[in-house]
Image: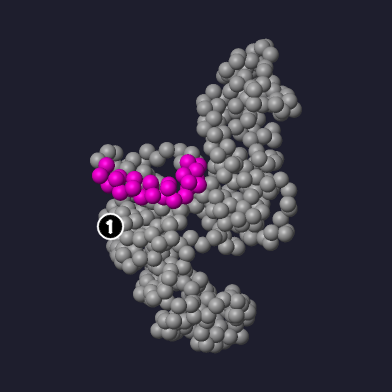
Amino acid sequence: MSSNVPSEPDRAKRRLWLALLEAHGLPARQHALDRLEASFADAGNAAHVAWLQRNFVYLLHRIRPAEGDDPLREVRLVARCTEMGLPAPLVREGLIDLGLRHHPEAEVVLRARLEQIEKLLEQPGGAPHDAPELLRMLALVVSGLARQGTTSARRTVVEHGLKQRPALGDTLERLGELGGYDLAADPETVDKLLGVLRAQLPMRVLGLSIRRHELGPQHLVRALTSTRCEPVRAAFEDVARRFPTEPFGQAAATALQNWHKIPAAAPDPEVSSPPPAAPAPAAGLAGDLEVFGLPELLQTLSQAESSGRLLLRDRAGRPAAELVLRKGEVREARVRKLALPDAFYQLLETPQPGTFEFNRLPVESVPDGDAYNVMGLLMEGMRRYDELQRARVLAPDHTFLRSTGNRPSPPAEETDGGFIRDLWRQVKDGRTPSQCEEAIAADAYRIRSLLAHWLAEGSLTAVEAPDSVPP
């Protein structure tokens, strides 16, 4: 039960192409919707059709619909992509899109999927996906229901969150999806959450602190953190007073400090206009690069004209790269020893799995130096990525190279004499292409392209082993 779609082309190249399509806006969105509809009549390779559908759905939830568009056609088409027997990446894309469509049919589908996934998790025999994948889908469904903005959808989230059945994972944690919404217009739901919060608070027995759920109180405080009504204020004051050193007590105190910063009692979206479908990234944005995608993340920050620091980490949690943006443009980058723009290109040329953290900064605190347009960098990065794959065929990672005695020449586009001399010296010292990349402050494309050029013109040749072992 694989989570990947078979026959999917190179992921980094796919992301770059999608970023370019996304830049075309509404025309690309309409084309994606038409192509999605036509794809259901395609009797070709099922895996390839699923991969195409995933791309079309991705574009639908990345590009805002035109104001006043009726989402019904999209909801019905995308709902077909969320059937549990389909490949997991396609199902996830569909669930994300439905969560952004404020429409009764979208809510109906999400509630049906919630029920299906719960049953599959509690009766796993014959499930089309494994438990970790189903839990990922479950998180997307709950987030989408919370975003619907209706009382019925949010009550469904609460009902799920309070089940607390082991097979469903930490359902209390998913209540945190309600933390961005004021629930004061639904006193029944607020009272239910407050009752569970009180029941989850640690109690003292014979001098010992007994906890029902290690993080339960913290999740419940988070769920109510944007709700502005007197019962919540009184509960938070009590929690902050009784548990001042606990994380949930501190969270309650923070919510009280910010009490007047968030407008109270927003109208119920069931009788008012829905909120925007795709809010701009907020301070503290973080996630998995495998899920979000670096090109998509950078384009989102660029379109939102964000200012801040983006830190990329590898799977071990070690810092791998850092970018600084000012009003959506790249101003600084640190990737190994590289400087802009090579540092940016390196991230696209050799994509690595990991996580990201973006923290907003005041515009005035970001250096106002050379500015690099994100879309321009992405387009050049895509070209370099394609050329790099061809160059790696001629100069694989661990190939040993030897001078033939012919004088090396530079390609027309490479004018940095110092870089050319440094790379030639590394090759003469017995370094492999991958070792050259580690030693020289240039992106992989420039290094491999020059090595491929020298191999093609005959100034270098590949050998089975170096003539001598470098000291």
282 lies above or below 150? above
The residue carrying pointer 1 sits among few (fewer than 14), some (14 to 19) or many (20 or more) residues within 10 Å by Cα, namely few
Left or right of 49 in this view: 262: right
Residue 280 percent coordinates (x, y): 54, 60
Q: Amino acid at mark 1?
A: Gly
Which of the colour schemes (rainbow, by chain, secondary structure, one colour) is used?
one colour
Residue 56 percent coordinates (x, y): 38, 48
Assess whether residue 29 is covered by the magenta stretch.
Answer: yes
Where are the magenta residues, as a range? Answer: 16-42
Left or right of 190 in this view: 418: right
For the question of whether residue 420 can be seen, the reply is yes
Which residue corresponds to the image point at 43% horizontal and 84% vertical from the top-left? 187
Instruction: Count every numbered label the image shows and give the total.
Output: 1
Residue bearing the label numbered 1: 125
Which residue corresponds to the image point at 39% horizontal and 49% vertical from the top-left? 30
Which residue corresponds to the image point at 69% horizontal and 59% vertical from the top-left? 363
298 lies above or below 337? below
Which secondary structure is most common in the magenta stretch? helix
For the question of whether residue 137 can be seen, the reply is no
Residue 407's quadrant in the figure?
top right
Query: Which quadrant of the figure contains the C terminus?
Result: top right
Assess whether residue 30 is covered by the magenta stretch.
Answer: yes
Left or right of 312 in this view: 90: left
Element type where label 1 sits in the image: loop
Which residue corresponds to the image point at 73% horizontal and 25% vertical from the top-left? 417
Residue 145 percent coordinates (x, y): 39, 67
Residue 242 percent coordinates (x, y): 59, 85
- Observer-nearest of 7 and 205: 7
The outermost residue toward the top is 405
